[in-house]
């Protein structure tokens, strides 16, 4: 028996060690951990295409995540979009996400298809106290990736080709904390003079009512994400003149490097309905009665907020005229501007969101989110970005036929998910404010079920089918397919299993 226990303990330590190595590796080499995650011409504006901190579960539910929190039993997950959710983590949890995007760019005359694959997120969550949980992770805040050509006919010059290219993005290493500030109220009440007086007076019904109310107050959670933002945004514009026009080609390139701390906040509250009132027509004396629910119903509420922030940044700018020699090499003729390490600020806008969810037992979950960002206040190095305020509406649902089904009935334990989202983006081009809409679907596949070691894993697969933009007014429409595969591991760290 002793050898058996030692083998099991070694298994826990090996799992723990592996997760720790992954965490250290990604956080240490974070500058190259995420590949370019977009191929959108619209990523040239602002700080690029924004990431909504969606994990594999949230992606398949339309991106609903503001009110989402863990229940009292595994499978636990990490919700980096709302730090208040960390307070409900009960086991050490690791999540790794991989994404694939296929985008068809469509104009009035042409179509082009581009594929991208990258690491989309990594997080590690852990319980600290019964009322306190934390998480650390690496998530891209934005991505830039585009290559656009444009032709214009100019009098006395001819056709001029304009080439726009961009790459890079802003990443964030975050440390999230979630607490339950009112945790322990029932115990304080039991130790109070009021409880003793009610107990002596044998007012058990009043005691039960007060205890239930104080237990519900324990479900309030508050959270804070402290993030370090870093990364570079590279943009290049070339003006290529026709041969013999008498003009030299020009190239203007800028590289913006972001480096600063950023904060966002969250709150959540969960209320459990164990009974339901009903009208008994047969009882004329006391017609209003209560009936216990077979499956309890949880009402989930959530809110997120981040204030307008001035983020430190540096910019390098280089402009020059050039020509191509007979071998096709670029030869610089004259430097127009060369500015290095110019310090400035990028103004990230105020944002907030609210979410609501209903969970019935461990079978049904329905959620909805509304979020907005004040992008009209965005500036970069004292230059107005020309962006508009944006908002997003998301809906999602999850169904599990029987979470406690035996291994032989595996499909009954699978999580089935659907969702949809609609967004008015921050981009207004040619008097047209762009919108984005998508339908989502996905599955959560449980892997293993080891109650002895309290070790659980799940593979979450989420797919989005959507569209952004329009072909009207010579704009570009994006038809996209995005797939996210998330790996979630729950484990009890540093505790040796016990056997009778």
Image (cartoon, helix red, strand yellow):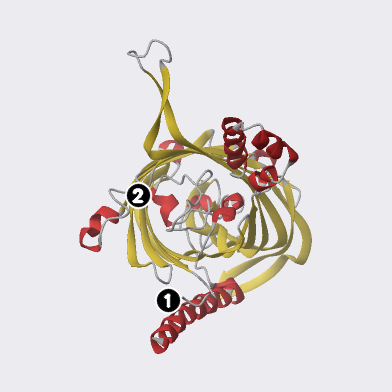
**Is 312 placed above or below 431 here?**
below
Q: Secondary structure at mark 2?
A: loop
In what quadrant of the picture does the C terminus appear? bottom left
Position of residue 270 measured from the top left corner of the image (x, y, whole percent): 54, 41
Q: CA distance from mark 1 to mark 2?
A: 68 Å
Question: Which residue: 60% across, 39% down?
Answer: 211
**Is 4 placed above or below 373 here?**
below
Q: Closer to the observer: label 1 or label 2? A: 1
In what quadrant of the picture does the N terminus appear? bottom left
Position of residue 275 measured from the top left corner of the image (x, y, whole percent): 43, 32
- Mark drawn on residue 436: none
Q: Is residue 179 left or right of residue 394?
A: right
Position of residue 164 measured from the top left corner of the image (x, y, whole percent): 54, 57
Mark 1, other Cα within 10 Å: few <14 / some 14–19 / many ≥20: few
Q: Which residue is mark 1?
A: 499
Q: Nearer the viewer, residue 435 or 188?
A: 188
**Is 32 placed above or below 71 here?**
below
Q: Nearer the viewer, residue 147 or 243?
A: 147
Q: Which residue is mark 2?
A: 110
> Are the residues flagged by discs 1 and 2 in contact, CB closer than 8 Å?
no
Q: Secondary structure at mark 1?
A: loop
Question: Which residue: 47% across, 44% down?
Answer: 64
């Amino acid at each position: 028996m002793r050898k058996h226990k030692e083998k099991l303990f070694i298994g826990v330590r090996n799992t723990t060690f592996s997760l720790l190595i992954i965490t250290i590796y990604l956080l240490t080499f974070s500058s190259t951990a995420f590949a370019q995650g977009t191929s959108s011409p619209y990523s040239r504006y602002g700080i690029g295409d924004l990431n909504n901190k969606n994990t594999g579960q949230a992606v398949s539910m339309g991106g609903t995540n503001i009110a989402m929190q863990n229940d009292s039993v595994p499978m636990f997950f990490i919700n980096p979009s709302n730090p208040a959710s960390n307070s409900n983590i009960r086991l050490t949890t690791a999540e790794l996400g991989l994404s694939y995007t296929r985008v068809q760019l469509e104009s009035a005359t042409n179509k082009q298809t581009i594929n991208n694959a990258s690491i989309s997120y990594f997080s590690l969550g852990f319980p600290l106290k019964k009322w306190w949980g934390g998480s650390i992770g690496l998530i891209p805040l934005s991505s830039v990736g585009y290559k656009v050509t444009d032709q214009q006919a100019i009098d006395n010059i001819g056709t001029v080709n304009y080439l726009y290219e961009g790459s890079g993005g802003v990443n964030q290493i975050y440390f999230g904390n979630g607490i339950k500030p009112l945790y322990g109220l029932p115990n304080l009440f039991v130790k109070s003079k009021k409880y003793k007086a009610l107990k002596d007076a044998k007012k058990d019904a009043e005691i039960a009512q007060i205890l239930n109310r104080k237990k519900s107050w324990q479900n309030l959670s508050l959270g804070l994400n402290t993030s370090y933002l870093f990364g570079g945004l590279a943009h290049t514009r070339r003006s290529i003149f026709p041969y013999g026009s008498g003009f030299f080609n020009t190239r203007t390139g800028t590289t913006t490097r972001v480096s600063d701390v950023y904060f966002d906040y969250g709150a959540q509250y969960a209320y459990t309905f164990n009974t339901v009132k009903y009208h008994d027509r047969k009882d004329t004396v006391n017609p209003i009665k209560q009936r216990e629910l077979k499956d309890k119903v949880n009402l989930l509420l959530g809110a997120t907020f981040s204030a307008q922030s001035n983020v430190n940044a540096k910019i390098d700018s280089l402009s020059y005229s050039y020509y191509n020699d007979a071998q096709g090499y670029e030869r610089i003729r004259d430097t127009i501007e060369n500015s290095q390490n110019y310090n400035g600020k990028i103004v990230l806008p105020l944002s907030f969101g609210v979410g609501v969810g209903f969970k019935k037992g461990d079978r049904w979950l329905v959620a909805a989110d509304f979020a907005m960002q004040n992008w009209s206040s965005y500036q970069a190095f004292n230059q107005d970005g020309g962006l508009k305020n944006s908002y997003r509406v998301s809906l999602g649902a999850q169904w599990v036929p029987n979470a406690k089904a035996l291994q032989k009935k595996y499909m009954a334990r699978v999580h089935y998910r659907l969702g949809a989202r609609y967004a008015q983006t921050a981009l207004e081009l040619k008097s047209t404010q762009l919108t984005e809409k998508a339908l989502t679907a996905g599955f959560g596949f449980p892997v293993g079920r080891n109650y002895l070691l309290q070790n659980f894993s799940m593979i979450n697969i989420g797919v989005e089918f959507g569209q952004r933009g329009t072909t009207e007014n010579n704009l570009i429409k994006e038809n996209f397919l995005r797939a996210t595969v998330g790996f979630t591991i729950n484990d009890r760290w540093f505790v040796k299993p016990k056997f009778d």
